[in-house]
Amino acid sequence: MAKIKIKQIGSPIRRPESQKKILIGLGLGKMHRVVEREDTPEVLGAIAKLPHMVKIVD
């Protein structure tokens, strides 16, 4: 499968607990961290729930 790189651009401080758990599930949690994940519907759905906190980088 294809891989995508995800970068955290927003802080989890003062965010709902569910959003913090989604970040941890993606392997993020600290600002400006970049992770590489499989391009699956589950990962894309998690990214769609946090458009203000993560972005896809090239």
Image (cartoon, rainbow, N blue to C red):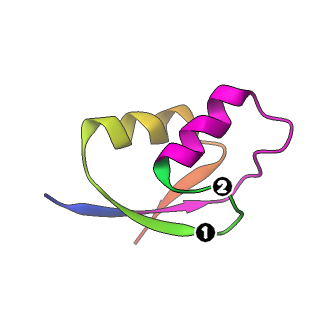
Q: Position of residue 4 (x, y in %)?
A: 33, 62
Q: Which residue is mark 1?
A: 33
Relative to 26, is 8 on the left or the right?
Answer: right
Relative to 26, is 24 on the left or the right?
Answer: right
The residue located at (66%, 69%) in the rendering is 32
Residue numbers of the magenta segment: 5-25
The residue located at (32%, 36%) in the rendering is 42
Q: Is residue 29 magenta?
A: no
Q: Nearer the viewer, residue 23 or 45?
A: 23
Q: Position of residue 30 (x, y in %)?
A: 70, 62
Cβ atoms under marks 2 and 1 closer than 8 Å:
yes
Relative to 5, is 16 on the left or the right?
Answer: right
Residue flagged by tag 2: what amino acid is it?
Gly
Q: Quadrant of the N terminus?
A: bottom left
Q: How many marks?
A: 2
State the image quarter where residue 31 is shown: bottom right
Q: Quadrant of the C terminus?
A: bottom left
Instruction: Specify the label residue 18 is tagged with.
Output: none
Q: Is residue 21 magenta?
A: yes
As helix, strand or loop, the secondary structure at mark 1 comes to loop
Q: Which residue is mark 2?
A: 29
